[in-house]
Image (tube, rainbow, N blue to C red):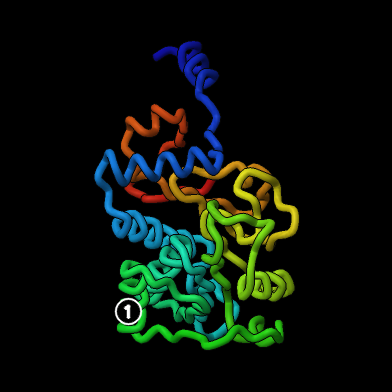
């Protein structure tokens, strides 16, 4: 390829697609129904990728505290399940996760992920300290796996509204899974938390256009036909990595 044709090809590369709530839901439905992915399979892929992203953003040797402590705050739905898987993999990577999971789901899949964490002796908090300094002193990081793209940010109920008030005040770095809790998936942040790191799953959501921190994408498993159908224009992943930094 000559220089001019290489330049022409570079000019035709389309920008990465940022998804609406409807598009994200449609892609997931297709993966489950048409491509026969299992929900447990997808959650495992995403949760492991989140843990790997955290190791890249905050390697063990870079943590400020002597113990590599991490607090994982899990919601009752799919983002919470991803948080549980993330915590399990962080434990395998020699971090010391603690889980705060105030409202456990009755779904058997969610319960399975909970048992897996319990069997690995990952501690669960019975309550989240409202004294912000206690969190700052105890943990190197907080993983926000609380609310997902499907949640209504204008109608956040307890205990999650109270948790958001606490998380907005802490100085400990926050890593958010897919959509930062309190954000509308399609709008710039109005009244949510301000994470230092965002890990987008499958493809970034429209709200991520206004995110200025470190941003990872975990979507390498997506079938090419889905990528093409939704014009995702995903960037090339390096080597055999399952995620990349945008």
Can residue 224 be seen here? The reply is yes
Q: Where is residue 128 in the image (x, y as percent from the top left)?
A: 60, 83
Q: Is residue 83 above or below residue 213?
A: below
Q: Where is residue 234 in the image (x, y as percent from the top left)?
A: 45, 36
Q: Where is residue 132 in the image (x, y as percent from the top left)?
A: 71, 82
Residue placed at 71% from the left, 52% from the top? 189
Residue placed at 31% from the left, 46% from the top? 32
Q: Where is residue 225 in the image (x, y as percent from the top left)?
A: 33, 30
85 sits left or right of 80 in the view: left
Circle 1 residues within 10 Å: few <14, some 14–19, many ≥20:
few
Can residue 70 be seen here? The reply is no
Q: Element at badge 1?
A: helix
Q: In this view, does 97 lie above or below 33?
A: below
Q: Quadrant of the C terminus?
A: top right
Residue placed at 51% from the left, 14% from the top? 8
Please give the count of numbered marks on the rendered protein: 1
Residue under label 1, please give it: 115
Q: Is residue 92 above or below residue 225?
A: below
Q: In which quarter of the image is the N terminus?
A: top left
Q: Nearer the viewer, residue 238 or 54?
A: 54
Residue placed at 58% from the left, 81% from the top? 139
Extreme residue in the left direction:
36
């Amino acid at each position: 390829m000559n220089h001019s044709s290489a330049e022409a090809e570079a000019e035709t590369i389309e920008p990465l697609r940022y998804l609406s709530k409807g598009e994200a839901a449609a892609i997931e439905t297709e993966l489950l129904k048409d491509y026969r992915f299992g929900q447990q399979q997808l959650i495992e892929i995403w949760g492991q990728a989140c843990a790997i992203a955290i190791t890249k953003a905050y390697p063990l040797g870079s943590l400020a505290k002597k113990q590599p402590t991490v607090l994982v705050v899990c919601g009752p739905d799919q983002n919470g399940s991803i948080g549980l898987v993330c915590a399990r993999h962080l434990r395998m990577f020699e971090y010391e996760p603690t889980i705060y999971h105030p409202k456990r789901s009755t779904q058997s899949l969610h319960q399975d992920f909970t048992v897996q964490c319990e069997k690995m002796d990952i501690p669960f908090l019975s309550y989240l300290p409202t004294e912000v300094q206690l969190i700052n002193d105890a943990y190197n990081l907080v993983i926000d796996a609380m609310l997902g793209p499907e949640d209504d940010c204008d109608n956040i109920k307890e205990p999650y509204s109270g948790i958001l008030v606490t998380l907005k005040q802490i100085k400990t770095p926050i890593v958010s899974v897919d959509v930062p809790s309190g954000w509308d998936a399609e709008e710039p942040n109005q009244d949510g938390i301000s994470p230092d790191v965002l890990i987008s799953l499958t493809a970034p959501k429209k709200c991520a256009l206004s995110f200025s921190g470190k941003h990872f994408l975990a979507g390498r498993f997506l079938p090419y036909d889905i990528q093409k159908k939704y014009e995702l224009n995903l960037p090339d992943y390096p080597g055999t990595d399952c995620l990349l930094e945008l």
